[in-house]
Image (spheres, helix red, strand yellow):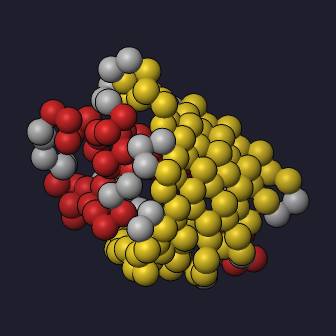
Amino acid sequence: IAVKVDKTDDSYAIHASFNVAANQDQTWDVLTDFGQMAQILSNVDDSKIVDRKGNVFNVVQKSHGNAGPLRVSFNSTRRIELAPKSEIRSQFVSGDSLKSSLFTTRLMAQGSSTQVVVQGTFIPTWLASSVINVETVVTQTRRQYAELRDEILRRKNGQARPACLVTKTCP
């Protein structure tokens, strides 16, 4: 999983990409499964879709991050717009850890595999910026997309999720 993060003033720009040995439909099904995201990602505690109007809806999530020995909780609402099977656009609406966030995720078929390319920027709040740096953003981004890729492959192969993901105790 390739991840590049650039910081300018208080803004972070992220470019991430990975390939997964699954078709575009299988990949899309996981990346857009916002109602089950708490069972897929270790840092998401709750996720639900609200205010759906076709391919546009809001996702309300509770998540957490670790800052040394501290566990910090975050709440957010994002507006999601889908261009089915090819693009997911996500824009920050409200929350307690970000001032703004705008991301685009693109899926491209590569034979029997799919390439996923993510580009976006975010600006953390003052409090969140005290525990965020380029290294933590790179690490967290890589972990998130590794967990999504793992879920795509688990579903493709009919495997169960690891118990630590279900109980939120993964290292």
Q: Nearer the viewer, residue 164 or 6?
A: 6
User: As drawn, is 164 to the left or to the right of 110?
Assistant: left
Q: Is residue 22 visible?
A: yes
Which residue is painted at 71% across and 55% down in the image? 121
Which residue is painted at 54% across and 70% down in the image? 79
Is the residue 128 above or below the residue 157 in the image? below
Quadrant in which residue 153 is drawn? top left
The image position of residue 46, as x and y in percent, is 34, 74
User: As drawn, is 99 to the left or to the right of 109?
Assistant: right
Is the residue 129 above or below the residue 143 in the image? below
User: As drawn, is 116 to the left or to the right of 113?
Assistant: right
Which residue is painted at 73% across and 50% down in the image? 13
Which residue is painted at 85% across and 53% down in the image? 8
The image position of residue 133, as x and y in percent, is 70, 56
Is the residue 119 above or below the residue 46 in the image? above
The image position of residue 94, as x and y in percent, is 60, 81
The image position of residue 30, as x and y in percent, is 32, 49
